[in-house]
Amino acid sequence: MISDLWYKNAVVYCLSVESFMDSDGDGVGDFRGLTRRLDYLHGLGVTAIWLMPFQASPGRDDGYDVSNYYDVDPRYGTLGDFVEFTHGCKQRGMRVLIDLVVNHTSNEHPWFKSARADPKSPYRDWYVWSKKKPAGADQGMVFPGVQKTTWTYDEKAKAYYFHRFYDFQPDLNTSNPEVQAELLRIMGFWIQLGVCGFRMDAVPFVIAEKGPDVGPKPKSQFQMLRDFREFLQWRKGDSVILGEANILPKEALQYFGDDGDRIQMMFNFWANQRLFLALATGDARPLAKALEETKPGYPTAQWGLFLRNHDELDLGRLTDDERAAVFAAFGPDKEMQLYDRGIRRRLAPMLKADRRLMELAYSLMFTLPGTPVLRYGDEIGMGDDLSLPERHCARTPMQWSAEKNGGFSNGAKTYLPAISGGGFGFETVNVAQQRRDPNSFLNWIERVIRMRHEVPEIGWGEMSLIPVRDKAILALRYDWRGAAVVVIHNLDPEPREVAFRSGADGDGDVRLVDLLGGEHSDPGPDGRHRFAIEGYGYRWFRAGGLDEAMRRKDV
Ligand code: GLC
């Protein structure tokens, strides 16, 4: 029964259609190209694809400024191509999540055009206006340093409009029942075309009260999340919402709802920032603490775990000293940093392409409590182009081969240049080359994903921290249906000796069978496991035996 929750043991891969595969040589990726690459994703072990926005858009924020929610941007193809794509996914057993960007529209959306042109427009109240410049107008910008204000005067409307993000992204008045009804209509439309759910953009802002008199801490209207979820589950029982919300753990748990009646999934930004802190300092304790703090209270709730995404690595929820430590390790130059809070680089260059560190980072992502979300290109260790502005540096074309434009397009010019030359250029870092090399990062990732599927304890089980004395060691145990998995990570570059009891409550220590290698561990006479683990090492074990999970009792 409850095993129907597909997202609990999924492997999600996020990509933008623009950057994946260009089928017609115009230099921009498209749905036809992406559809041809589905076997690649399927072969990697991906079970769900998350698409960044592909709806009609002026493209001033890479599609996060939608001008028509009911159409595919012509640069990427047609609705017909989209349905062929979702059908192709279905045939391979992969699900599709799409970005739902409804906190704001583009200022070129017909709703906004109508709203600003006429105070009597039926769309006037779909946006948020003020006659006078509100007191807090110069606070709460999401892109500090680039965005100057959150209220901009519109000559046509003769009023200020609210925009949490850039000024070309006016906020929708999401409290308006008509707007809410429209949001459901948008979801209903895409659900009908074959998607299985949404990555909801900027959720805290979608559900926040908005208006000139709202102070710096607007109230959240949680009922909206419940309404969205209810609607979706009526339309398509297995559809989910994955929320983007970089908030405090206490608040985040409210998004799941006390009875798990709000959204099913949330990105764990809290743990993400502490994961990078742990990698930077070799101290696993802040990460362990974050895992305790973000334990969801309800079994259907699930975290999405990621290393890098399409935005900057946001470190805004660390202390100044902690952030400085991560900057020093992974983004020391000003040009690598963004919005006074984050690092805009791709993962591989951040980790200096150190294979040990990259494996450690991914092993953590695949074994922390939740559902792993990979970013396109990170499976081959793609780099970034810091000469590009803001977040564009990490949105370059997928590197398929050593051919022209990295095999992404045979056009004369691409939407952004493929990374060429140096340690990360497509000439050396590409799928074709890594496919041929059994020891490549791509083949390592594929093996790890295969194993992750076979360890459902992680996605489904109850996580507990195993007490260890060494601060460099993170030791986790998962229990599910009578089977248990133990994962050990060494955050330090030097080898360590680890000693622990694997039993959750100290009893019944058994053989730990190494799932990725052959280094099994038997408890010593004192009942403790004791072994050496190499610098940045990781071990995935099943307690009792390899096939313990196969023999587990179904409950
Ligand atoms: C989210 C997206 C980001 C976008 C912003 C505005 O934070 O992840 O890429 O710019 O919302 O929609």
Image (cartoon, rainbow, N blue to C red):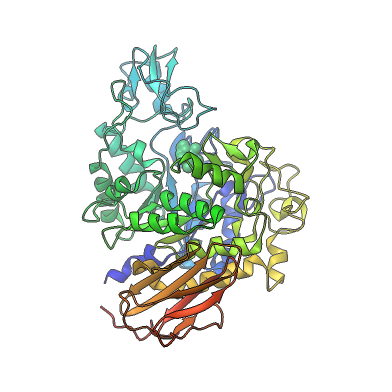
Which image quadrant for residue 445?
bottom right
Residue 34 in the figure: left or right of residue 207: right
Residue 540 sits above or below residue 177 on the image: below
Q: State the image coordinates of residue 64 (x, y, percent, origin top left).
A: 48, 38
Image quarter hosting the C terminus = bottom left
| Residue 395 visible in the shown view | no
| Front residue (pair 148, 395) | 148
Q: In which quarter of the image is residue 318?
A: top left
Q: Which residue is located at x 41 percent, y 59 percent?
A: 288
Q: Residue at x 31, y 28 (%)?
A: 210
> Looking at the image, how many numbered discs can be counted on the residues?
0
Q: Where is residue 291 in the image (x, y as percent from the top left)?
A: 38, 58
Tell whether 370 sits left or right of 27.
left
- Quadrant where the N terminus is found in the figure: bottom left
Q: Where is residue 115 in the image (x, y as percent from the top left)?
A: 37, 21
State the residue at coordinates (35%, 17%). 134
* 349 vs 127, nearest the viewer: 349
